[in-house]
Image (cartoon, helix red, strand yellow):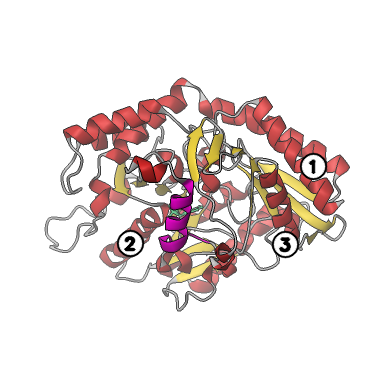
């Protein structure tokens, strides 16, 4: 890199303003304000180009940097591997690819095969293609529908948006891919039929959709273990058991999207392991290499894999490729990332510190009536903000965003569901790196306390 350029903030900002099209945000304000440029990270902290320090309570804004910033051991492992062997297309294997697959499968009893790709969306696309091809090969093309849940998100491509339960994310990007069917969300707090027996009723709504569509037309049910951007929705006790039973009853593959919950985020290696379910296909991305390299995986059982083994059909194998799924930086970073999670007991820390964070946020409820509910698992917590606790009317999105902005001004980066579900972008999101300490969490929640006081009174 040109160090003269890197050391000149004005040049960087102007180059960014002139040529970078940023993800997710409206550019009009950059006519008068500077784009934010992040230049350094260490542990839970990041520094921007103007020298401001922030504590990052959302692991790179999108819940990714699970092991924290500045891990030299990951950088060194990737460097050494790139010099030795940087890339070879995935029709062949590589040493880190083989080793990471083996280590990953050790953490996922009942699963057997790892298909490499680069992003969460891409891993989900692979899964959808597998389901469709299984339908063609084994069910005469009939069992091709994929069920997805309201408020879940599975990625940004057209097929993933077709399986997306966040209407504001989908707006203006249709028409969508046919064959994706929505089931209701399972957020009891905002369900009209909440109360005793809710989990069973939520499962029944899924069965109703299956029966309406016809079980022999449905290939897979695709769910997040805990809905992430849709508002940190932890399904009620009994829900997941009901889901598993429905999948077995109607011969539907259970596809679990662990893009956010995987790799320790909820306090176990994978979110589904909190609920004792056995998926057929699992996708994962963000925390797999904590953002140190681009890697995602679509992991299947041997039974799913076996459905593609057939030397008599020239088109019968999984005819899919991801060019950069052959980059060795991904599995190399993922191996070191996994070693760190294991050696530093970051799943355990996520569980312990998650309980502490949940307690801190719950304590805030006594002072701030605008907090309607606190929910989450491990270092993945949410606080749903309401205008009125009795009616549970969601707090207006602009006020929720004002809380986020106030925290940012205090040097604390938190998140909130935004521009996703009409009328329900009202949940503050917390997903700090899994190395977070009590002091870090005290600082984060302290800023939220101040922000809520200023915004909600
Ligand atoms: C649950 C879930 N699945 C999939 C994705 C898509 O991942 P990516 O942005 O890597 O394509 C996301 C992204 O936030 C996600 O939250």
Give the CA distance from mark 1 to mark 2: 48 Å
Q: Position of residue 276 (x, y in %)?
A: 53, 39
Residue 288: % across, % down: 41, 39
The residue located at (41%, 46%) in the rendering is 285
Circle 1 residue? 450
**What is the residue that sits farthest to the bottom in this orientation?**
175
Q: Which label lies toward us, 3 or 2? A: 3
Q: Nearer the viewer, residue 267 or 57?
A: 57
- Where residue 173 sits in the image (x, y, percent)? 48, 74
| Residue 427 to residue 43: above or below | below
Residue in view at x 68 percent, y 58 percent = 201
Looking at marks 3 and 2 on the same chain, the residue that comes earlier in the sequence is marked by 2
- Res. 398 mark: 3
The reply, left or right, for residue 204 in relation to residue 62 is right
- Residue 258 visible? The answer is no
Label 3, label 2: how many angstroms apart (C-alpha)? 39 Å
Disc ID at residue 129: 2
Task: Tell me whether the residue at label 3 lies in contact with that at label 2, contact meaning CB atoms closer than 8 angstroms.
Answer: no
User: What secondary structure prevails in the magenta region?
Assistant: helix
Residue 430 visible in image: yes
């Amino acid at each position: 890199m040109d160090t003269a350029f890197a050391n000149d903030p004005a040049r960087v900002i102007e180059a960014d303003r002139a040529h970078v099209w940023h993800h997710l945000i409206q550019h009009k304000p950059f006519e008068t304000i500077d784009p934010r440029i992040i230049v350094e990270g260490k542990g839970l902290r990041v520094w921007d180009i103007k020298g401001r320090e922030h504590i990052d309570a959302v692991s790179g804004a999108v819940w990714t940097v699970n092991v924290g910033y500045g891990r030299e051991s990951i950088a060194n492992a990737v460097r050494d591997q790139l010099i030795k062997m940087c890339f070879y297309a995935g029709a062949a294997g590589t040493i880190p690819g083989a080793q990471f697959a083996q280590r990953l499968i050790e953490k996922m009893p009942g699963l057997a095969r790892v298909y490499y790709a680069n992003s969460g969306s891409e891993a989900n696309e692979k899964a959808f293609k597998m389901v469709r091809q299984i339908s063609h090969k084994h069910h005469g093309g009939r069992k091709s529908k994929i069920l997805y849940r309201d408020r879940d998100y599975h990625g940004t491509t057209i097929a993933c948006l077709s399986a997306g339960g966040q209407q504001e994310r989908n707006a203006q990007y249709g028409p969508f891919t046919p064959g994706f069917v929505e089931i209701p969300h399972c957020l009891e707090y905002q369900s009209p039929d909440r109360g005793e027996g809710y989990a069973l009723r939520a499962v029944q709504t899924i069965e109703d959709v299956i029966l309406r569509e016809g079980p022999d037309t449905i290939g897979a049910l695709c769910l997040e273990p805990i809905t992430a951007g849709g508002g940190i929705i932890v399904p009620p006790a009994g829900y997941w058991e009901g889901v598993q039973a429905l999948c077995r009853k109607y011969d539907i593959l259970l596809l679990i999207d662990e893009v956010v919950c995987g790799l320790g985020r909820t306090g176990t290696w994978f979110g589904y392991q909190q609920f004792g379910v056995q998926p057929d296909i699992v996708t994962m991305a963000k925390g797999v290499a904590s953002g140190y390299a681009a890697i995602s995986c679509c992991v299947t059982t041997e039974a799913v894999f076996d459905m593609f083994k057939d030397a008599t059909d020239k088109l019968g194998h999984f005819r899919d490729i991801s060019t950069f799924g052959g980059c060795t930086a991904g599995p190399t970073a993922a191996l070191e990332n996994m070693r760190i999670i294991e050696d530093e007991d970051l799943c355990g820390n996520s569980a312990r510190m998650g309980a502490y964070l949940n307690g801190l946020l719950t304590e805030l409820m006594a002072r701030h009536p605008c907090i309607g509910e606190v929910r989450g698992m491990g270092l993945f917590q949410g606080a749903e903000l309401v205008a009125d606790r009795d009616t549970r009317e969601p707090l207006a999105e602009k006020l929720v965003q004002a809380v986020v902005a106030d925290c940012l001004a205090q040097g604390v980066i938190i998140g909130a569901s935004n521009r996703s579900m009409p009328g329900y972008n009202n949940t503050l999101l917390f997903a700090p790196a899994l190395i977070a300490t009590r002091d870090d969490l005290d600082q984060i929640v302290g800023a939220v306390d101040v922000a809520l006081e200023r915004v909600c009174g």
